[in-house]
Image (spheres, rainbow, N blue to C red):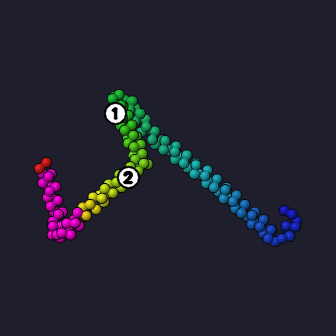
Amino acid sequence: IHLVELANPKVITKYVRDWELAKEAKDVTTLTVTAMEKWSLLLFSLGQRTVKVLQPGAQSFASWFLSVRLITKVYIGIGLITIFMIWLLQREIKRRKYVQRAYDKIRRLSNRFTDFYNGIIDEIRYESRILAEMVPHLVFAAVTVALLVF
């Protein structure tokens, strides 16, 4: 800082404000580091307690697994591999959006069929309103008879 700058009150105010912000930032940094240390100690102690709780179960599972027959171990391995492959397949289906594309395709086909059916009903309605009202019932009866016969 030059002496000429110190004569200007705005410059002095700016440096004082910067100094106060730096002090606050240092305090915040110190608090953050302290909090991180405390959290890490807490998580470490929880991890140690978790290991102590799970250790007997893991030991008993290991002793059980070593005592079972080979074919059982093979079945367990096949089951785990199957679960893992299903999980990978599910992830791939979601990623490539197969279900969404299939749903969209079915919806488009359904809309095309509905438009086609409504067009036929409109043409029949143009000739006879009563016959147009009977068509859905006739179609249902025809499908039912076809299912019963075949």
Name of the residue lying farthest toward the top: 70
Residue closest to the eye, 141 or 4:
141
* Mark with earlier residue (1, 2): 1
Mark 2 closeness class: few <14, some 14–19, many ≥20 residues within 10 Å: few
| Residue 135 belongs to magenta span | yes
Q: Which residue is mark 1?
A: 75
Residue closest to the eye, 75 or 68:
75
Query: Left or right of 70: which side holds 149?
Result: left
Q: Which residues are magenta?
A: 120-148
Q: Which residue is mark 2?
A: 101
Residue closest to the eye, 93 or 7:
93
Query: Left or right of 59: which side holds 114?
Result: left
State whether residue 2 appears in this view. Answer: yes
Q: Quadrant of residue 140?
A: bottom left
Query: Does 80 sit above or below residue 97?
Result: above
Residue closest to the eye, 98 or 120:
120
| Residue 145 belongs to magenta span | yes
Between the C-alphas of marks 1 and 2, the distance is 36 Å
- For image coordinates 60% across by 52% down, the residue present is 36
- For image coordinates 71% across by 63% down, the residue present is 21
Q: Position of residue 60 (x, y in %)?
A: 40, 35
The three-letter code of the residue at mark 2 reads: Arg
Name of the residue lying farthest toward the right: 3
Q: Secondary structure at mark 1?
A: helix
- For image coordinates 50% across by 44% down, the residue present is 49
Depth-wise, is mark 1 or mark 2 nearer the camera? 2
- For image coordinates 44% across by 48% down, the residue present is 95
Q: Position of residue 147 (x, y in %)?
A: 15, 51
The three-letter code of the residue at mark 1 reads: Tyr
